[in-house]
Amino acid sequence: MTTSSRVPRHLPDDGPRNATACLEQENAQLRHAIGSHATVDQALGVLIAIHRIPPDTGFEVLREISQHTNIKLHTVAEMVIDWALGRQPLPEPVGHELGEAMQRHSR
């Protein structure tokens, strides 16, 4: 018999207050993940529209920029969105890596 539960298996044994705190922390982490995912999707849309590339290539470009600049993916995505909206120019390392990634993927 298989049972499933939405309660994490790592709940502490020291009472419901601590269990509630763990669930609240997990919910906060999930909300952050959802927000980051939406930001990455928006930046992906920017790259698709501007460079006329397929979605999987756009994600690879964002991932490569993140890896080569050592900047978290969601932060790179925020920079791309701000650039597209005219709020600020792309920081030099991000702009450089974007150009390099687009050259690699246009071959």
Image (cartoon, helix red, strand yellow):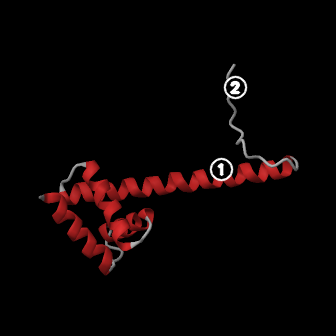
**Residue 96 rendering spot, x and y as whole percentages:** 25, 75
The quadrant of the picture occupied by the C terminus is: bottom left
Marks counted in the figure total 2
Q: Which mark is residue 75?
A: none
Depth check: give the residue in front, 74 or 97.
Answer: 97
From the image, tell me which residue sits under label 1. Answer: 27
In the rendered image, which quarter is residue 97 located in? bottom left
From the image, tell me which residue sits under label 2. Answer: 3
* Residue, far top: 1
Depth check: give the residue in front, 11 or 62.
Answer: 11
**Residue 53 rendering spot, x and y as whole percentages:** 20, 53
Seen at 39% across and 67% down, the residue is 76
**Residue 58 rendering spot, x and y as whole percentages:** 27, 55
Seen at 48% across and 57% down, the residue is 36
Whether 105 is drawn above or below 20: the answer is below
Seen at 32% across and 67% down, the residue is 65
Estimate how packed mark 2 is, as few (under 14), some (14 to 19) or many (20 or more) residues with alpha carbons within 10 Å. few
Q: Amino acid at mark 2?
A: Thr
Q: Is residue 107 left or right of residue 49?
A: left
Q: Amino acid at mark 1?
A: Asn
In the rendered image, which quarter is residue 80 located in? bottom left
- Tag nearer the camera, 2 or 1: 2
Marks 2 & 1, CB-CB < 8 Å contact: no
Q: Is residue 15 left or right of residue 4?
A: right
Q: Secondary structure at mark 1?
A: helix
Whether 93 is drawn above or below 52: the answer is below
**Res 89 visible:** no
